[in-house]
Image (cartoon, grey):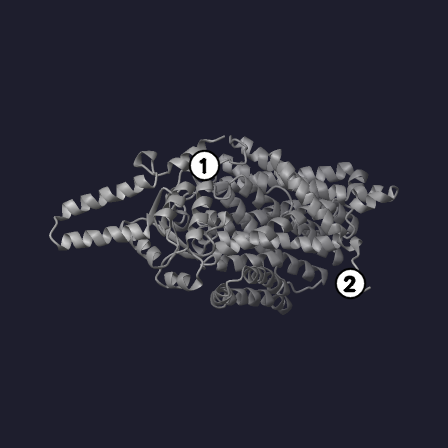
Amino acid sequence: MAGEVQPGAYKDVVLFLATAGVVVPLFRQWRISPILGFLGAGVLLGPYGLGQLAREVSWLDAFTIANPDELAQLAEFGVVFLLFAIGLELSWERLRSLRRYVFGLGALQVALCLSATAVVAYFAGQPPAAAIALGAALALSSTAIVMPILTEQKRQHAVAGRATFSVLLFQDLAVAPILVTLTLMGDRTDQPLSPALLLSVLPAVLGVAFLFLFGRFLMRPMLRSVARAKSEELFVAACLLVVVGAGLVSAITGLSMALGAFIAGLLLAETEFRHEVEVRVEPFKGLLLGLFFLSVGIGLNVPLLLDRPLVILGAAVGLLAMNTAIIFGLGKAFGLKTKSAIEAALLLAGAGEFAFVILGQAMTEGLVPRDVGQTALVAATLSMFSIPFLAQLGLRLGGRRVTPAEQPAEKPEAPSGDEAPKVLVVGYGRVGRLVGDMLKRHALPWVGAELDPRLVDQGRRAGETIYFGDAARADFLLRCGLADAPALVVTMDDPEGVETIVAVARELRPDLTIVARARDARHAQRLYDLGATDAVPETVEASLQLSEAVLVEIGVPMGLVIASIHERRDEFRKALNRPESLGGRSRRFRERQAKP
């Protein structure tokens, strides 16, 4: 039967989802990085874990990953989505500020670590070509493991975090030249600067140019058109198209898919869709990264490790020690403080996911003997397993408390204007524009959020920072800067939407000043109950302004009119059960918060 379901075909997917459902909550409860859980689960569920026992105990086959190669291909998208998300968080200004670390510290790290590993391999008996290939593979660190760790520890904007990211970015840029060089070495060409080498680089240049042109001139109109359709599913599909499409264009031209996705994210970061795309892509990134870590664990060749324990463990420890020493020295040379240099060195000490790509090609080209390549891959995998522990060690040696809520102890570089705390204005209609104008008159920075793409486009054309997205989502509000915002102003002409946003914002920030637009006095009462600091009823304010106008026009002194208007407004507030002594929050809300 054509439509008959074959449960075995879905076994690997079910095992991964079950692993994610168990590992993430359990390890977060233990305050341990879930990365370690996925790595350990990969070893357990792989062919070298339960797969070995399944040969004798048949029922264990149901708990073994059957097709690790297919899973690994899908897992590569975890790194792609990670680099896309990193690009979204950057701006051109911030990237330019990192150029000294990227092209200085990053370039020297790759060159020195590659050379040191190649020298060791050469004196260990490997021919020059194999030594260079091994050095190139083991000189690159793991972006997929290091960046989530920095995010968990909230260290990505600290000095050590910025230096670490800069080095990782240069490593991603170095992958394509390394692969091209290995191909030429495999061809045994006698002309290293031949036209063939120049032609091999040309597709990569054209690919990057295409991505920049598409991002500058076509990406924003495409997303704007999709946003006008007001379909969440269509917008998610468009986001996935941007990520996967950019990665495929990059891969076709000889670069890594992750680098193409990073460029797409960097270009999209300059648009009004930045935060909404982040929200939509985040679930895919989390799942695919978990799948990537699972595939790394599956790839650990346990029998080979048991067969050559001293060689492999010695290689892994030696690699970690040598990379740590080199990167620490470079960090100090580039002006990093000792604590930051230690932290960055330990984070970057291990090998990375590109070791599998580079060594795989080197073995295919015949540059590295297969047994040597497999041994190096196991050592690289062990070094990747050690990265979360080294990250914790780096924090401890730096004198910082290791907790999930840990804040940067060092003063980071001066933030760009995009990072400065701003008043958040939700809704950019007539009321929102007036609120923004008054904030500007008082020199108060602000940022807007709006779900209507036409209003977003109007604000952008006027030079305002307006983001497209649904402010009823907690993660979108946080990405717009709610965590640091001095105040939230909700100006939408949608009573239910205003109530949802006020409730979500109050849950996220109990101390936040929230001023919301209300339809009438009854609606204002509901907003006060939800935790609004102040609710402004349209009917009440319109009545007060009409009264003020008529009283002034018929000759009542302005001072008396203003005093009476303020007095009447206070009476309305008291009628709404919101006396000023409550500090801007309703009595009912305070009582509800006080309940256990």
Q: Nearer the viewer, residue 544 or 345?
A: 544
Please tell me whether residue 211 is drawn above or below residue 81 in the rendered image.
below
Which-is-in-front pick, marks 2 and 1?
2
The image's mark for residue 410 is 1
Q: Nearer the viewer, residue 538 or 367?
A: 538
- Residue 412 appears at what percent x and percent y? 44, 41
Tally of numbered tags: 2
- Residue 178 appears at what percent x and percent y? 63, 56
Q: Is residue 439 left or right of residue 353?
A: left
In terms of image quadrants, where is residue 560? Answer: top left
In terms of image quadrants, where is residue 49? Answer: top right
Residue 122 visible in the picture: no
For label 2, the crowd category at 10 Å Cα-Cα, with few meaning under 14, some 14 to 19 and many 20 or more, is few
Quick one: SS at disc 1?
loop
- Residue 206 appears at what percent x and percent y? 56, 68
Q: Quadrant of the N terminus?
A: bottom right
Amino acid type, residue under disc 1 in the picture: Glu
Quick one: SS at disc 2?
loop
Q: Is residue 218 left or right of residue 492?
A: right
Marks 2/1: CA distance?
60 Å
The image's mark for residue 3 is 2
